[in-house]
Amino acid sequence: MEPESVKRFREYLRIKTVHPKPEYWECADFLVAQAKEIGVEHQIIEPVKGKPIVVLKLAGSDPSLKSILLNSHTDVVPVYEEKWNYPPFGAERVLMDNGEYHIYARGAQDMKVTGSCYLEALREIKASGKQLLRNVYAMFVPDEEIGGEDGMGAFVKTQEFKDMNGGFDIDEGGPSPNTTTYSFSEERTLCWVKFTARGNTGHGSQFIEATAIEKILPVIYKLMEIRDESVAELSKFGEAKALQQGHFTSVNLTKLEGGKQANVVPAEYVATFDIRITPDVDCHEFYTMLENLAKENDVELEYIKRGLVNVITDLPDTDPFMIAFNDACKRQGINRVPMIMPGITDARYIREAGIPAIGINPMFNHKLLAHDHDEHIIESEYLRAIKFYVDMIESMGSVSSS
Ligand SMILES: CSCC[C@H](NC=O)C(=O)O
Ligand SMILES: [Zn+2]
Ligand SMILES: [Zn+2]
């Protein structure tokens, strides 16, 4: 028998909130219907037209206290459909040889599973008739996968967000490949940067000076050197490599453009990099280094997107919210290990707004398939995750001081 919570999760997965044209209103309709069924208030905020944010509220008995926020994004990244063994928006429930059911869909891990856990946990708590002390808000926001400027970035600036009076945010994490759970209270800083070199052109048989290629190559070499250094440092950690990656700056040359024909020396060459700066270094110093590198080589630099601040959540274990958080983890058999988020998430906007945020995903034994083909989750782990969130929400929502 398929649990009702799984049916609802699969319904959420079937909504094509996929870039570049996510069906945000279909998604909002689904979430509003959920709120009505669960019996909690909801609100739709649209700080940017066509990008609705849906917020569900589990009302606490003392609304003057700071609230607990549960954040999730509704959008998902595109798919290479031909590479999937199951339709990416079919949300098929497949019985595996080991007796486990898998649910296949884009967003199954990243991160509709978490959004569904919030919905199911609110449903359970509401149905139990218990009233918590603090307001709890589940937020469903668009556009995280494209930077979140029009989603959480815009939302945190609204009066509606301020009125929620958030005291602590539970946010996005990743499932664990084993039974250790990662928790994220800091992220690397995103830097997408494009270098354009211009130079002399002419016949491909000649020794032409000051070509675009000669200018761009030292820039590429230098950045690849930084990449090599990170790889070398990271490899020293052996098995613990994945856990440590956030302490190193990652560099990837993601686009290289230029040249028209084999015998024409290119007049222009463009190199685009996806760089993630570790919070262990000052991002402004890193930017100065990039700018100097460009200047020294007569290359133009343009930031496509970059972070300018990097706020981390650093609460002591004696903080009442942390006590409640850790207690719930312990009760649910979650062995929490801190890690720096390798990518960027909407939690950064919440931290910048002055609210502590921790990203977590309590599911065990999953291959990380965010943004990958055949993204799926193990049903029994989803069901266990719901229990985790029920406990976590009740625990955090009952914190009396702070
Ligand atoms: C600039 S938006 C990119 C956001 C994305 N976040 C999760 O995958 C990431 O690449 O980290
Ligand atoms: Zn995500
Ligand atoms: Zn993602």
Image: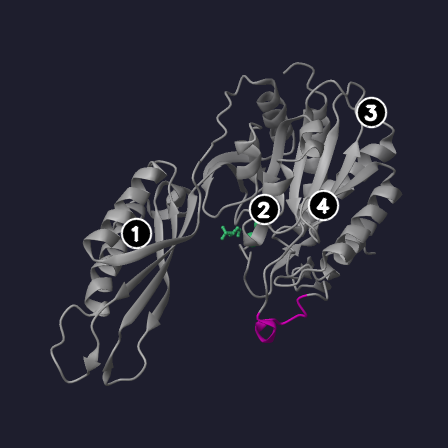
Residue matched to label 2: 364
Residue matched to label 1: 231
Please state the extent of the stretch shown in magenta in the rendering.
80-88
The tag on residue 131 is: 3
| Cα gap from disc 2 to disc 1, whole angstroms | 27 Å
Task: Classify mark 2: helix, strand or loop.
Answer: loop
Q: Amino acid at mark 4?
A: Glu
Let me know if residue 336 is in the magenta part: no
Task: Point out the frontmost of discs 3 and 4.
Answer: 4
| Cα gap from disc 4 to disc 1, whole angstroms | 42 Å
Task: Point out the frontmost of discs 4 and 2.
Answer: 4
Q: Amino acid at mark 2?
A: Phe
Does residue 265 appear to the left or right of 51 in the view shown? left
Does residue 372 appear to the left or right of 259 in the view shown? right
Task: Point out the frontmost of discs 4 and 1.
Answer: 4
The tag on residue 46 is: 4
Graded by Cα atoms within 10 Å as few (under 14), some (14 to 19) or many (20 or more), the crowding at tag 2 reads: many
Residue 183, above or below 294: above
